[in-house]
Image (spheres, rainbow, N blue to C red):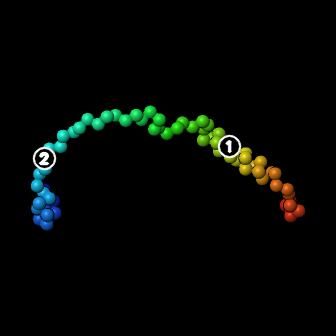
Amino acid sequence: TTPGSRLLFPELSEPTAPVRASRVPTAHTGGLTMPRRKTTRAQDRTRRIQRERDLNDSYPKSACAT
């Protein structure tokens, strides 16, 4: 099959010279990975819940609360 744009832009359909791959120096990528977790997700969740409960307990109880 041939692209339909070949009818509109025939000069763009001409073959080009073959591509020669050049050797690109390898970049240093030692520290570009995602950091590892220090704690598990479950530990983080438990810590966040406990922190919020501690903050809620630090507020004085209102007279309306039962």
| Residue 20 placement: quadrant | top left
Q: Mark 1 against mark 2, which lies toward the viewer?
A: 2
| Residue 18 placement: quadrant | top left
Q: Amino acid at mark 2?
A: Ala
Disc nearer the start of the sequence (1/2): 2
Q: Nearer the viewer, residue 4 or 8?
A: 8
Q: Amino acid at mark 1?
A: Thr
Residue at disc 1, secondary structure: helix
| Residue behind mark 1 | 46
Residue located at (60% from left, 41% from top): 41
Residue 57 in the image: above or below residue 28: below
Q: Nearer the viewer, residue 27 or 7?
A: 27
From the top left corner, tell me how far across and down residue 21 is, in percent: 22, 39
Badge 1 local density, few (<14 within 10 Å), some, or many (20+)?
few
Q: Nearer the viewer, residue 37 or 22?
A: 22
From the top left corner, tell me how far across and down residue 39 is, in percent: 61, 37
Judged left or right of residue 11, residue 35 is: right
Q: Tally the marks.
A: 2
Badge 2 local density, few (<14 within 10 Å), some, or many (20+)?
few
Q: CA distance from mark 1 to mark 2?
A: 62 Å
Residue located at (86% from left, 61% from top): 62
| Residue behind mark 2 | 17
For this orientation, the residue located farthest to the right is 63
Residue at disc 2, secondary structure: loop
